[in-house]
């Protein structure tokens, strides 16, 4: 069962979408204090050649993910660089398996991955947002080789959150 519920996610989406630029900056400052490695994984994208608009897209995903963590009422430990790397290797392995499997097995593997993901609502949000972003850039013929880094980073955000054990409820 997901620790971040659909209600937590919906509340986070509403709050982030209603935020002014200053409020988003304040939330980013809070992320820097509590989840600095997640923020760094987004900000480093510009060094990989990712366009500023794509970095902004990724930061918005992070804002919703982080706000969802807050909405859950759980106390989340700092997600380390080592955990990010571990989750990235796991995800790359799953993608490579899916790419090398026969068509029906590949679809089954992807379906199983999504249906058994520990944070399904958050995964669905990230996949939906990423797919919409990809359709928009494709429609403008604005695809870039660096888009793969944005997709990988967005998936790694949700996988790191899913793989991190929570300490306890904040109100305890």
Image (tube, rainbow, N blue to C red):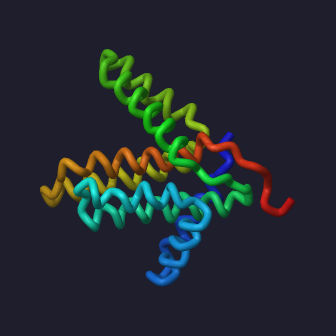
Query: Which image quarter holds the C terminus?
Result: bottom right
Residue 98 position, x and y percent, is 36, 24
Query: Which image quarter holds the N terminus?
Result: top right
Residue 129, compared with residue 83, is above or below; it is below
Q: From this viewpoint, is residue 37 visible?
A: yes
Name the residue furthest right: 172
Name the residue furthest left: 141
Q: Residue at x 44, y 81 (%)?
A: 21
Q: From this viewpoint, is residue 11 visible?
A: no
How many numbered discs sit on the rendered protein? 0
Query: Of 59 and 37, which appears nearest the observer?
Result: 37
> In the figure, is residue 75 to the left or right of 59?
right
Q: Residue at x 51, y 71 (%)?
A: 28
Residue 97 position, x and y percent, is 38, 22
Residue 12 position, x and y percent, is 58, 65
> In the figure, is residue 99 to the left or right of 18?
left
Query: Of 44 and 50, which appears nearest the observer?
Result: 44
Q: Quadrant of residue 55?
A: bottom left
Q: Residue at x 48, y 77 (%)?
A: 25
Residue 57 position, x and y percent, is 36, 63
């Amino acid at each position: 069962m997901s620790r971040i519920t659909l209600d937590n996610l919906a509340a986070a989406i509403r709050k982030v979408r209603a935020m002014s630029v200053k409020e988003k900056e304040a939330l980013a400052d809070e992320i820097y204090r509590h989840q600095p490695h997640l923020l760094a994984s987004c900000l480093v994208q510009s060094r990989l050649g990712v366009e500023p608009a794509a970095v902004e897209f990724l930061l918005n995903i992070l804002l919703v993910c982080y706000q969802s963590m807050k909405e859950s009422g759980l106390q989340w430990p700092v997600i380390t660089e080592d955990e990010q790397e571990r989750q990235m290797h796991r995800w790359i392995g799953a993608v490579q398996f899916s790419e090398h499997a026969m068509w029906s097995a590949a679809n089954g593997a992807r379906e199983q991955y999504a249906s058994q993901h520990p944070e399904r609502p958050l995964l669905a949000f990230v996949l939906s947002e990423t797919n919409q972003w990809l359709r928009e850039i494709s429609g403008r013929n604005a695809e870039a080789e660096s888009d793969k880094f944005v997709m990988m980073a967005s998936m790694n955000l949700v996988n790191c959150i899913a793989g991190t054990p929570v300490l306890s409820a904040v109100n305890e």
